[in-house]
């Protein structure tokens, strides 16, 4: 699997909306966890059918991909943990998909949350929020906002951050976005995020920087089904996932420094985290250990 991943010719379709359907795969995986609203979101978005549509042509049974359930649960919960531990009360989530993290966090009236994504997925999310709450999505809470924005478009990001208090720092988060980007897109996204950090202060937290040097380790998770799943995602998105990842941590940190940023690596899965999908997904203890040991977040600040 990994040899094909590393050698395939990079392909990056210019239509970023083709990435959006992967949110349905994530939504389905999350139904095996205790993440707030996960089961409602999956049902309302018809996520399982979208997963079948993506995987059936590759001959992959969705049940063969359930190693992704704890991975996505750990990722979600680690971001929640780090947002809260930052002490900052303003959050800008990029490419937020249909996770509804903002709906969960704004139960705290002191937390201001802006969820952004492309128009299609945002419109679908608004309908889901309305179905869950019985209210118009942007009227559910005064501290929760849904805005159409592409991380590569600074004008759209400015419209999103206009919902925030410019005198307070912001936490910028995203998960499952940059893996689909070309190197040029990664650079542009980084510069746009840096501009926001310089304006507001705060921190950028993401698990999205994977390294080609360590991708080989993931070949041990899910065996051949994992490779077929990645091929299915590449066909659906028109993008060669991970093909333009940074070579290793050293290259990545040098890139951050060249952009006036510094990064700190932290483990996603700590001793206090309860991973409910470990049992419901039927994942083996060996794979669970691989996930727990290998998953990290990056906490990035402007110098």
Image (tube, helix red, strand yellow):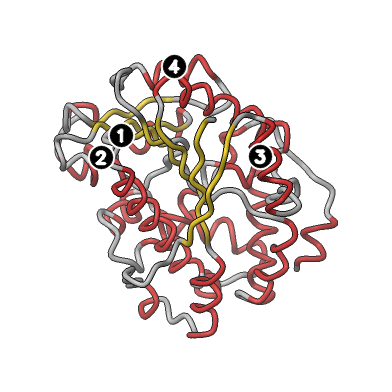
The quadrant in which residue 162 appears is top left
Under circle 2, the secondary element is helix
Q: Residue 249 location, x and y as percent?
A: 68, 53
C-alpha separation, residue under disc 2 versus residue under disc 1: 5 Å
Q: Nearer the viewer, mark 3 or mark 1?
A: 3
Q: Quadrant of the N terminus?
A: bottom right
Residue 190, above or below 208: above
Under circle 4, the secondary element is helix
Residue 293, above or below 241: below
Q: Which residue is the site of mark 3? A: 181
Q: Is residue 63 left or right of residue 212?
A: left
Which label is found at residue 5? none
The residue drawn where x is 48% and y is 65% is 71
Q: Residue 112 location, x and y as percent?
A: 25, 31
Q: Residues within 10 Å of mark 3 (few under 14, many from 20)?
A: many
Q: Which residue is the site of mark 4? A: 158
Q: Nearer the viewer, mark 4 or mark 1?
A: 4
C-alpha separation, residue under disc 3 versus residue under disc 4: 21 Å
Q: Residue 135 location, x and y as percent?
A: 15, 33
**For marks 3 and 1 on the same chain, the one whose residue lies earlier in the sequence:** 1
Q: Residues within 10 Å of mark 2 (few under 14, many from 20)?
A: many
The residue drawn where x is 38% and y is 21% is 161
Whether residues under marks 3 and 4 lie with C-beta atoms below 8 angstroms apart, the answer is: no
Q: Which residue is the site of mark 1? A: 126
Whether residues under marks 2 and 1 lie with C-beta atoms below 8 angstroms apart, the answer is: yes
Under circle 1, the secondary element is helix
Which label is found at residue 129? 2
């Amino acid at each position: 699997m990994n040899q094909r991943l590393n050698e395939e010719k990079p392909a990056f379709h210019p239509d970023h909306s083709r990435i959006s359907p992967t949110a349905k795969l994530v939504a389905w995986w999350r139904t095996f966890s205790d993440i707030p609203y996960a089961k409602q979101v999956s049902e309302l978005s018809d996520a399982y059918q979208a997963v079948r549509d993506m995987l059936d042509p590759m001959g992959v049974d969705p049940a063969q991909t359930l190693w992704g359930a704890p991975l996505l649960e750990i990722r979600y919960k680690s971001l929640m943990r780090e947002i809260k531990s930052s002490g900052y009360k303003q959050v800008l989530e990029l490419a937020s998909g249909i996770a509804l993290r903002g709906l969960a966090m704004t139960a705290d009236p002191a937390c201001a949350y802006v969820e952004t994504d492309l128009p299609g997925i945002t419109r679908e999310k608004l309908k889901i929020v309305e179905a869950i709450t019985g209210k118009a999505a942007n009227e559910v809470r005064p501290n929760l906002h849904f805005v159409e924005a592409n991380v590569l478009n600074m004008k759209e990001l400015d419209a999103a951050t206009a919902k925030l208090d410019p005198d307070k720092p912001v936490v910028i988060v995203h998960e499952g976005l940059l893996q689909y980007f070309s190197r040029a897109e990664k650079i542009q996204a980084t510069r746009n995020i840096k501009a926001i950090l310089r304006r507001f202060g705060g921190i950028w937290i993401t698990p999205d920087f994977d390294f080609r040097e360590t991708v080989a380790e993931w070949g041990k998770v899910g065996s051949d089904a994992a490779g077929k799943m990645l091929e299915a995602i590449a066909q659906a998105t028109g993008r060669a996932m991970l093909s333009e990842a940074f070579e290793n941590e050293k290259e990545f940190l040098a890139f951050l420094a060249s952009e006036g940023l510094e990064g700190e690596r932290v483990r996603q899965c700590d001793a206090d985290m309860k991973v409910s999908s470990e049992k419901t997904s039927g994942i083996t203890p060996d794979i669970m250990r691989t996930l727990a040991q290998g998953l990290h977040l990056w906490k990035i600040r402007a110098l």
